[in-house]
Image (cartoon, grey):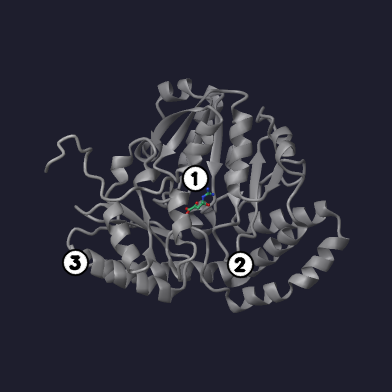
Amino acid sequence: MQDTQMSPVVTQTSPGNLTQFEYLALNSPLNLSDGHARQELTPTQGRIIDELPSLWAEAVKRPVEEVEREAHRTYFELLGQRSYPATDGRVLSCYSSSVAMEIFARSLATATDAIALVHPTFDNIPDILKGVGLRLVPLEEEVLHGGDLPADLLRSVGCVFVTTPNNPTGRVVSEQRLRALAAQCAEHGVVLTLDTSFRGFDTRAHYDHYAILEESGCRWVVIEDTGKLWPTLELKIGWLVSAANVGLPLAKVYSDILLGISPLVMSMVRRFAEDAAGGGLAELHRFIATNRTILRERLADIPGVTFPDPDSRASVERVHLGERTGLDVWTALREHHVYALPCQQFHWARPEEGAHSLRIALSRSASSVVKAAEALRSVLLAG
Ligand code: EGV
């Protein structure tokens, strides 16, 4: 080597954050990168799309408040969230959960300068929170699920933020853990915020969170999301829901950002939730489970490859690659026109912990999952 000043070998330049990796996959037929739903519509979902002109006509005629309330009632009840605060302006409808997150973050920054955040999790969450000037304290999944949080941690922050089911691990905060966590947050005057964007995939997250949060008396915020569940071409809702005593200017910041979302989207979400309640959700769970099995079985005999989240029911699956790095495998997969997601940036506090994993999206047609699994198999066997 002639140039002894050379920086450590960099084989690829990283495109940036996880979403910037996801952009690279958007035009590929084998995009198993982002967590949005891209499988085909089921026959009954297809019929809802055929009904859109009549949903439009109906949405034009009816009061928005009514259309909106039906949408959140149907969706929240589908997922077991019976005790959510339906009536006093505490459910704010946003274009996406990230918009809800931004509104939450700006509001929180008026009240505190530090937040504990689950680690790992999707990197736009820490990035949005840092973007409003908050200092982030990592809350390891093991600590979160292991028992009471350290009192030192609770004294050092104004909020605890938890993604459940988590992305990418699929870990779910149990009813018992949520009750304990909410009690601790109440005791310390700390806001408890949940991002439940992947809730729909896992019935273990369908116990009534709002009953527990309300009983605890803690100051809570929940971000719900329809965006991961159905292949609706990015037509979706992120709901920002809060306790009466939350003490944050959520409604004011919301009013800075938007007047409201489309009643057409609200009506469509209501119809998809009705279809899900009538059997579509169970069918979706079977569909994701089948895709997960396809992926695991096709990679099962490859030396060094493991699945770190055996209990996950989320619509994404992590693959641990052994000695290989996620970035190397991502690069090799790209030559097969297959796109996955390297996991480094999920580990926002210590990226090296994600260096040897890839995340594969499962909300895709089974044939795409088969093709991607075969390509991944040949890449992994090659080196
Ligand atoms: C996932 C994309 C945003 C995010 C995808 C996601 N990023 N909103 N900046 O929606 O898991 O791929 O959450």
Q: What residue type is labelled 3?
A: Ala
Identify the image quadrant of residue 73.
bottom right
Q: In this view, does 266 lie above or below 282?
A: above
Mark 3 burial class by Cα count in 10 Å: few <14, some 14-19, many 20+: few
Distance CA(mark 2)–CA(mark 1): 24 Å
Q: What residue type is labelled 1?
A: Glu
Residue drawn at point x = 28 percent, y = 71 percent = 298
Residue drawn at point x = 73 percent, y = 33 percent = 252
- Tell me the number on the disc at residue 276: 2
Q: Answer yes or no: do the residues labelled 3 and 2 have beta carbons within 8 Å?
A: no
Q: What element carries label 2?
A: helix
Of marks 2 and 1, which one's residue comes earlier in the chain?
Answer: 1
Q: Answer yes or no: do the residues labelled 2 and 1 have beta carbons within 8 Å?
A: no
Of marks 3 and 1, which one's residue comes earlier in the chain?
Answer: 1
Q: Which amino acid does label 2 sit on?
A: Ala
Q: Is mark 1 on a helix, strand or loop?
A: helix
Residue 135 seen anywhere in this rendered image of the structure: yes
Q: Is residue 241 above or below residue 302?
A: above
Q: Answer yes or no: do the residues labelled 3 and 1 have beta carbons within 8 Å?
A: no
The one nearer the camera, 124 or 210, is: 124
Of marks 3 and 2, which one's residue comes earlier in the chain?
Answer: 2
Q: Position of residue 120 (x, y in %)?
A: 39, 42
- Tell me the number on the disc at residue 38: none
Residue linked to disc 1: 175
Judge left or right: residue 115 versus residue 42. Answer: left
Q: Which residue lies furthest to the front in this view?
A: 2
Q: Position of residue 35 (x, y in %)?
A: 48, 57
- Tell me the number on the disc at residue 382: 3
Q: Where is residue 86 in the image (x, y as percent from the top left)?
A: 73, 47
Q: Quadrant of the C terminus?
A: bottom left
Mark 2 burial class by Cα count in 10 Å: few <14, some 14-19, many 20+: many
